[in-house]
Image (cartoon, helix red, strand yellow):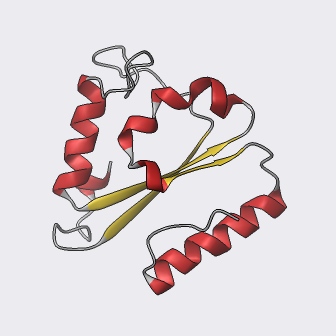
Amino acid sequence: MFEQTATITDPDANLMFLITDGAPTLDDINGEYPCDVVTGLPTASGFDLIMRLTEKNIRLYILGIGSGWNTHSKKVECLANDAYIYEQPNFTPEEFEKIEEEFREILCNGQGVISSS
């Protein structure tokens, strides 16, 4: 994934945006989701991903979309700080443009948090 990109270095302030319905594919090695659906804690594969993101100084933003997000969100929420998880149940092209504009504010102005409007 991102470790193979030569332009990502540890001291950079890197951001990753994950747009998901929350239903991840099971890990090929361990057959598990990134987060335990009962405890909400990282599984082995989730912990591994969190460590890799941390080592490269990558802040993960999660945008949960669609009606499936409420059903599956616990499977990925442990990967990001709660302040960087956003939900958009009615995901339309117009909503995407609005959210994209807010993400642009984060990238261009360095605010780091999306408004709740």
- Going 30% across and 31% down the picture, which residue do you hit? 46
**Which of 97/88 is in front?**
88
- Going 49% across and 28% down the picture, which residue do you hit? 74
Residue 61: image location, x then y, percent: 46, 55
Residue 34: image location, x then y, percent: 37, 28
**2 up-or-down from 108: above or below:** above
Residue 55 lies in what quarter of the image?
A: bottom left
Is 63 on the left or on the right of 59, as rendered?
right
Is 109 on the left or on the right of 10, as rendered?
right
**Which of 13/87 is in front?**
87
Residue 98: image location, x then y, percent: 74, 68
Residue 2 lies in what quarter of the image?
A: bottom left
Residue 43: image location, x then y, percent: 29, 23
Count of picture labels: 0
**Which of 39/76 is in front?**
39
Q: Where is the C terminus found, in terms of image quarters?
A: bottom right
**108 up-or-down from 14: above or below:** below
**19 up-or-down from 40: above or below:** below
- Going 30% across and 60% down the picture, which residue do you hit? 58
**8 up-or-down from 104: above or below:** above
**Which of 54/25 is in front?**
54
- Going 23% across and 62% down the picture, which residue do you hit? 57
